[in-house]
Amino acid sequence: MIVWRTLGLGLGLLIGVCLVHGQEPVAAGQVKTSLLADRSAITPGGTVELAVVFEIPDGWHIYWRNRGEGGMETTLAWKLPDGFVLGPVRFPRPKRYIDATGAHTFILERRPVVLAELRAPSDIQAGQSVEIEVDARWAACKESCVLGAERLKLTLPVTADAEEAKLLHEDQFTFARGQVPLPMEEAAYLKRFEAKANVDRIQSGKKFEVAVVIEVADGFYLYAHEPLAQGLNPTDLFHDSVTGLVFDRPRFPPGQMIQSYGMTFSVYKDRAVVILPVEAHVLPAGEEVRIGGVLTYQACSEQTGQCMMPTAAEWSLTIPVADAGEAVRTANEELFRSTADYQAAGAGKGPDGRTPSSEAGQGFTLDSVVRTTARQREYPLAVWLIFAFLAGVILNITPCVLPVISIKVLSFVQQASESPARVFRLGLAFSLGMLAIYNVLAILATAAGLVWGQHFQSPTFTLVMASVIFVFGLSVYGVFTLGVPRAVGDLAGQAEGEGYLGSVAKGALATLMGTPCLGPFLGSVLVWLATQPPVLVFLIFNTIGLGMALPYILLTARPGWLRFVPKAGPWLETFKQAMAFLLMGTVIYLLGILNKQLGGSAVVWSLVLLMSLAIACWIIGRWLTAETSAGGRMIVLAVAVGVASLGGWVSYGRGFRPPSDSVLPWVPFSMEKLTELTAEGRTVFLDITADWCPNCKYNMEFVFHTEEVAEAIREYDVVPMLADWTGQDPTIGRLVNMLAPGGSVPLCAVFPAGRPDEPIVMLEIVTKRQVIEALRQGSGR
């Protein structure tokens, strides 16, 4: 199975590469490479360290010295002058990547550096120059793969004076050496680190296992292979490719649960043993085979909880190959027996000790072929029409509609003494507004595929509805009188009371407000309707509308029933204002939707809009009276519209605008993420802010979120990180005290690449020039 999986993935990569090959070069996936030396010259018999640097675009990766189950190994073919000797090629520690097919590959990301030591012959003559060449080949992959190849050249002068061989690129080489795995005997924070096989020799055609034994130093623990929290560095095992051997995926032991900083982690303490299954194919009898690879891990102090820099160590095992007919005996029985016991105890359980509900497999995706089990009964069309009609009737008493219906109840009270014909026409107008919206919903369902209530997914629609309801509420409170222009009002019969246009608008508003609610029957009707033709969609939606409008048609068709409504009096004002509280509650509900859609900042700016609407309505109610002249009316309306428009422009511009290029792509702060980024040699710009800090807001709006700073962030390849200190956070508090003892916010700092312990700290209000200069210094340019 391992062989077929590997062949299949290799074929997939080859096809992907062939599709890319021959096309015009594209920026996506292009990897920049360079060849560097750590000294300006080389001496006879001396050494220089060489570095092949890969600069990989974000989101892409290349492959390690062993590709794993897919991809293509990164290879370096060296061409050296006569007599020069190249030492072992040292790759940085890899990372496990699981692709869309489930294949486990070993990858390198961002800026990996491969090191090798070059030794010159002792008889080389000073005064000449030597040229070193290397052919680098790789596959850069994301959704697809792009093959890359480049011949890199480096010319070094030969000098007899060692002092003339000046150090070069010190920061880059220091960082690169820190990424290379340590030798097995020098593994940090481990008191024992070794590899053993369960047989004394390998036999072709047989399977065996390798145990990598990790004994953690006293007072430390390692994060387990699945540490149960994002952003942590798990323990992982990688193997080298060996001709004649096929490796399966390693089996990791279950971790121990610990509590730290209010979170639960899975860790390895004392001893952990990782089992690597291997199958031998054809091997040369009588020879020895070296099996090795890299262990990656991160150690933390049990006493303080402080974690060390992520690290890695090489592991290896040399084992002979059995001659023909030679017996193979078991080895290290006690080790493998004890390992089998505790791995069996954790078998079938997740890293937290819980048993999963099902075996791992292909999960549900949006590309899955769905074969649902029907749970809905089939009914004749007449039954569905009855359900739709009843659903419309019941919508009138749902929390979504009730606040708007309260307005209509007030109009019924006011209309009790009017002519029956006019009351009936107003009821029909109210129903017409309802039916109009239901037909719009039917059009959206058939033409655009929008389901019931989906228009509330638009933040703009949600804000408009909140504003309309808010203005209705202000009118009911008596801040101003809601009406329409006099000419329109006369046409609508407003001189006699409520106008027809007002009734249509209230009916439409009641329907729009009812769409987020699903009363009894309505859910089943909508599910059934999803598979019906457009004719039935319109029929059902209009039936729901008729059901919702029926109570008002009946009530206005029988004016005598209005006699049961109490006559107007002082109680009416109290009742009206009580109904206004329902409207304001609806506004809060809609702002809650907005908070889910865009976050708290959008809600704050929406309140700015509502405040401006309140001021505009107050201006109209205070100065727009029957005695106001025509010119005065124009001035009052212009001022009110100006105030409302200004509030809308500010609110929508601040709370609803999409991020522009000048808004930095902030990474949320965590100490683990800051450690990870700085360990990778990235320059990090950290801003520590708080909502109660106005100077922080100034820095953010007028310094950080500007084109100049955004361009510097991109040019110097800096990661912007945002730490929010609005509430108490001990970790941020400790960090502030480390960076600026006794200081507070605003505080921002640049952690230079390769020198994270030398941050450039800036306090109080900063300038764009100050920040850009700090970014430049931090990037080493």
Image (cartoon, rainbow, N blue to C red):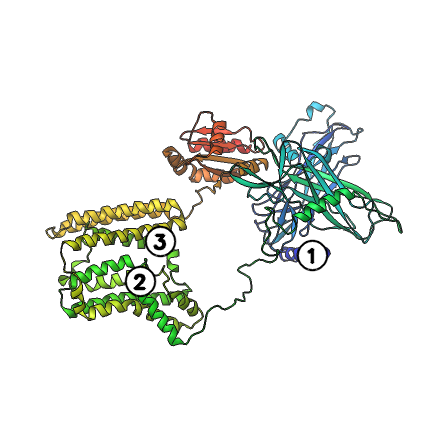
Assess whether mark 2 and mark 1 are in contact (beta carbons under 8 angstroms): no
In this rendering, the label closer to the viewer, 1 or 2: 2
Q: Upstream in the sequence, badge 3 or badge 1?
A: 1
Q: Position of residue 377 (x, y in %)?
A: 45, 71
Q: Position of residue 312 (x, y in %)?
A: 66, 37
Label 2 is placed on what type of residue? Thr
Label 3 is placed on what type of residue? Thr
Task: Say whether residue 498 is visible.
Answer: no
In this rendering, position of residue 624 left or right of residue 781: left
Q: Which mark is residue 650?
A: none
Q: Which mark is residue 5?
A: 1
Q: Which mark is residue 460?
A: 3
Assess whether mark 3 and mark 2 are in contact (beta carbons under 8 angstroms): no
Q: Nearer the viewer, residue 369 or 269?
A: 269
CA distance for labels 1 and 2: 57 Å
Task: Say whether residue 299 is visible.
Answer: yes
Q: Upstream in the sequence, badge 1 or badge 2?
A: 1
Q: Nearer the viewer, residue 544 or 490?
A: 544
Q: Secondary structure at mark 3?
A: helix
Q: Secondary structure at mark 1?
A: helix
Q: Secondary structure at mark 2?
A: helix
Q: Which mark is residue 511?
A: 2
Residue at 24% x, 54% y: name it.
579
